[in-house]
Each structure stands twice: as C-alpha cells, then as structure tokens.
Amino acid sequence: MIDLSLAGLLGAVLGTVAAAVAYGPLLAFAERRFWPRDPSASAEERSALEREIPLLRRAVLAVDIIALASLGYWLGQMIGG
C-alpha cells in the first residue's frame, strides 16, 4: 500500500493553490518571452505562433502544478513528519 502522510497531502493541496495563484504571472512571463518583438515578423510566423500558444499555456500549467504540488508535498512531509 502507498504510504502517504496527511501533512504531505495538505502541503500538496497548498502547493496546488499556490500554483493556481502563480499561473497568471508565469503565463504572462512565458508569453512575453516567446512572442516575437520584431514587428516585421511575417503573417505566417504570427499564425504559427497563435496556433502554438495554447500548447504553451497547457505546458506552463502542467509544469506549474507538478512542480509546486511536489514541493508542497515535500515541505509538508518535512515539517509535519
């Protein structure tokens, strides 16, 4: 059987809440980094980027939740035993 601690699970829940709060700023940062700054970018490049932005958003959400929930579980386990 899997041995999960209550403190770890509470930490994971708090980490997931923190991930939800941090998602907006992280997404804004990621989109700024990937959006071309050059106004002379071709229409094809912009069209391709607009098709790929939803994938970027999902990837940021997935990494955000996995990282912060894992960190929350680990901290909860360390603090709560």
Image (cartoon, grey):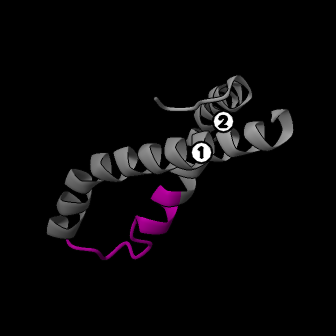
How many residues crowd mark 2 within 10 Å: few (<14), some (14–19), many (20+)? Answer: many
Left or right, 63 with respect to 71, comes to left
Query: What segment carries the magenta color?
Result: 30-42
Camera-nearest residue between 1 and 49: 1
Q: Is residue 73 magenta?
A: no
Residue at the outermost left position: 44
Amino acid type assigned to the residue bearing label 2 in the image: Gly
Identified at 74% across, 39% down, the residue is 77
Q: CA distance from mark 1 to mark 2?
A: 7 Å
* Residue 79 x %, y %: 85, 39
Proximity of marks 1 and 2: CB atoms separated by less than 8 Å: yes
Identified at 49% across, 67% down, the residue is 33
Instruction: State the count of labels.
Output: 2
Residue denoted by label 2: 15
Residue at the outermost front position: 1
Q: Give the quarter of the image for residue 34.
A: bottom left
- Tell me the element at label 2: helix
Examine the rendered structure and indicate whether residue 58 appears above or below residue 1: below
Residue denoted by label 1: 70
Q: Quadrant of the C terminus?
A: top right
Counting residues from the start of the chain, the first of labels 1 and 2 encountered is: 2
* Residue 54 x %, y %: 29, 45
